[in-house]
Image: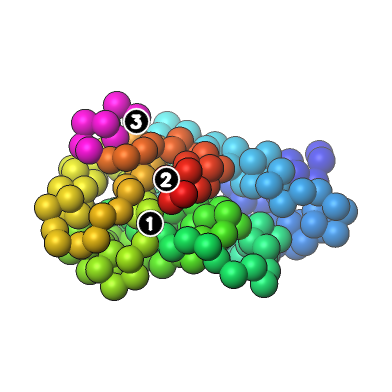
Amino acid sequence: MTLLQSIAASVAAGRRKDAGKLTSEALEAGIAPAAIVDEALLPAMAAVGEKFRRDEIFIPEMLVASLAMKEAMRLLTPHLVEAGVEPKYTAVIGTVQGDLHDIGKNLVAVMWRGANFKVIDLGTNVPPQAFVDAIKEHRPQVVGLSALLTTTMPAMVTTVKAIRTSDAPPVKILVGGAPITSQFADEIGADAYASDAATAADLAQSLAA
Ligand code: B1M
């Protein structure tokens, strides 16, 4: 088994300490942080989701896997974000109301920091008004909405509407998350849709410029 496969296996099994130890080993071995995310962490979480869908594992297993992924991300984040660079733009991000999934949203936040954004992270289960208030307070160029559940897609609609009809300063809205599509983004009046965190970083830069 390669080091990347071992990291994926430890995350999928929810072995947090192993995930951390192996991630450190991979960094020391000179493996690129983005490769650790793309080739070990993301496939591991996809496999966990597939097992959950097939009723082979349950919520506790999903939860420990997400904690193992977070431990790996904690070690990778400083390597994905360039230190000491004065951010050029500001972005607000959050997972919409009713939705507690934050791993994808956190990944987008890390990539945005790496793309020269100051990121205000509102966390998960964020009510529409909290997005509006944050836009008024921080005056970002871009706001990002994440949703992982089909049942929370309506909260994304409500949030976009709340932002567009508020007296907050104009802002570009970027949406993403597993059930979101570019067609849905168009329908709800978002400015852009990104299928992954790297695309979200590219798009945020062009939206902000
Ligand atoms: Co949940 N869960 N979960 N879960 N969970 C999914 C999403 C699910 C697909 C699993 C499945 O059935 N196969 C399913 C949703 C089904 C659906 O709606 N169609 C599901 C369900 C049903 C649930 C509960 C309802 C289970 C229950 O209680 N019966 C419940 C809901 C709780 C709630 O939110 N109210 C629940 C709970 C949980 C845990 C708490 C146990 C845990 C979350 C822990 C956490 O996030 N801190 C969890 C997990 C871990 C998952 C899976 C396994 C993994 C999600 C993840 O982190 N993926 C997930 C299955 C799966 O995704 N295959 C599943 C890795 C992450 C990097 O990917 O978030 O997709 P993702 O982000 C991607 C892109 O989507 C994109 O970029 C990232 C990649 O670069 N992206 C953006 C995301 N946000 C973006 C924003 C952008 C741009 C791109 O711009 C702003």
Q: Secondary structure at mark 2?
A: helix
Q: Looking at the image, which residue sits at the far top?
A: 183
First-in-chain label (2 vs 3): 3
Position of residue 95 measured from the top left corner of the image (x, y, whole percent): 33, 55
- Mark 1 or 3, closer to the camera: 1
Who is closer to the viewer here, 208 or 111?
A: 208
Q: Chief secondary structure of the magenta span?
A: helix
Q: Is residue 193 above or below residue 36?
A: above
Question: Which residue is denoted by mark 2 in the rendering?
Answer: 207
| Left or right of residue 198: residue 33 | right
Q: Residue at x 17, y 50 (%)?
A: 164
Position of residue 174 measured from the top left corner of the image (x, y, whole percent): 36, 45
Going by the numbered disc 2, the residue's amino acid type is Leu
Colouring scheme, one of rainbow, by chain, secondary structure, one colour:
rainbow
Q: Which residues are magenta?
A: 182-189
Q: Looking at the image, which residue sits at the far left?
A: 165
For label 2, the crowd category at 10 Å Cα-Cα, with few meaning under 14, some 14 to 19 and many 20 or more, is some
Q: Quadrant of the N terminus?
A: top right
